[in-house]
Amino acid sequence: MSNAVELIAIPEQTIAYLSVHGSVRQMREPFARLYAAVAKAGLSAAGPPMARFDLNLADPDDADYEVAVPIALGPNGMMPDNAEDVRSDTMPAHYALVTTHKGPYEEIGAGYAALTEELNALGYGVAGPASEVYLVGSDSVATPADYVTEVRLPVAR
């Protein structure tokens, strides 16, 4: 199956994020901690959850990565102190090569291969961590065949 790739503009976005060390196959607990801290801070998600990784992830079971969610910050424009180890940041506007993966997370490698092939064909350089945006995931559907994940690779010339 071919993964269509397009170059899109990603707008500036405020996110709450949690830095994690562990298996990228076990994100349920870090996402639960992230959402609990965001709720405790009196904030709410303003878009689908995502994870950010180094593109050259050597060992998916022993990795450093981030789980994140777009948020609208409170009136003072900051993540409150009671958010524990969750932080906020502004992801700057950027361009990214993007493909949509439909199906189980274990098969998402085809999306990364398509992005890498397009990156090389266009002569772009990688300009940041790869990200997966979970449009339809395990929290909303029962079967992995129905998952929809947008795979993004920030690029620059």
Image (tube, rainbow, N blue to C red):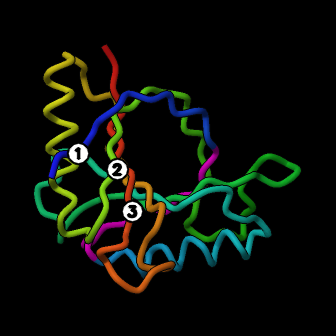
Query: Which quadrant would residue 5 be assigned to in this image?
Result: top left
Identify the residue at image location x=46%, y=67%.
136
Query: Which quadrant would residue 90 be assigned to in this image?
Result: top right
Tell which residue pokes out farthest to the right in this image: 75
Please tell me how crowded label 1 is: few (under 14), some (14-19), or many (20+) other residues with Cα within 10 Å: some
Query: Which quadrant would residue 119 be assigned to in this image?
Result: top left
Give the mark, 2 or 3, whose residue is nearer the N terminus.
Answer: 2
Residue position for label 1: 3
Please tell me how crowded label 2 is: few (under 14), some (14-19), or many (20+) other residues with Cα within 10 Å: some
Asked if the residues shown at circle 1 and circle 2 are in contact, with their CB atoms under 8 angstroms apart, the answer is yes
Classified by dominant secondary structure, the portion drawn in magenta counts as: strand
Q: Is residue 17 magenta?
A: yes
Distance between mark 1 and mark 3 Cα atoms: 13 Å
Amino acid on which the number 3 mark rests in the picture = Val
Distance between mark 2 and mark 3 Cα atoms: 7 Å
Give the mark, 1 or 3, whose residue is nearer the N terminus.
Answer: 1
Asked if the residues shown at circle 2 and circle 3 are in contact, with their CB atoms under 8 angstroms apart, the answer is yes
Residue position for label 3: 148
The answer to whether 145 is drawn above or below residue 80 in the figure is: below
Amino acid on which the number 2 mark rests in the picture = Thr
Q: Which residues are magenta?
A: 14-25
Please tell me how crowded label 3 is: few (under 14), some (14-19), or many (20+) other residues with Cα within 10 Å: some
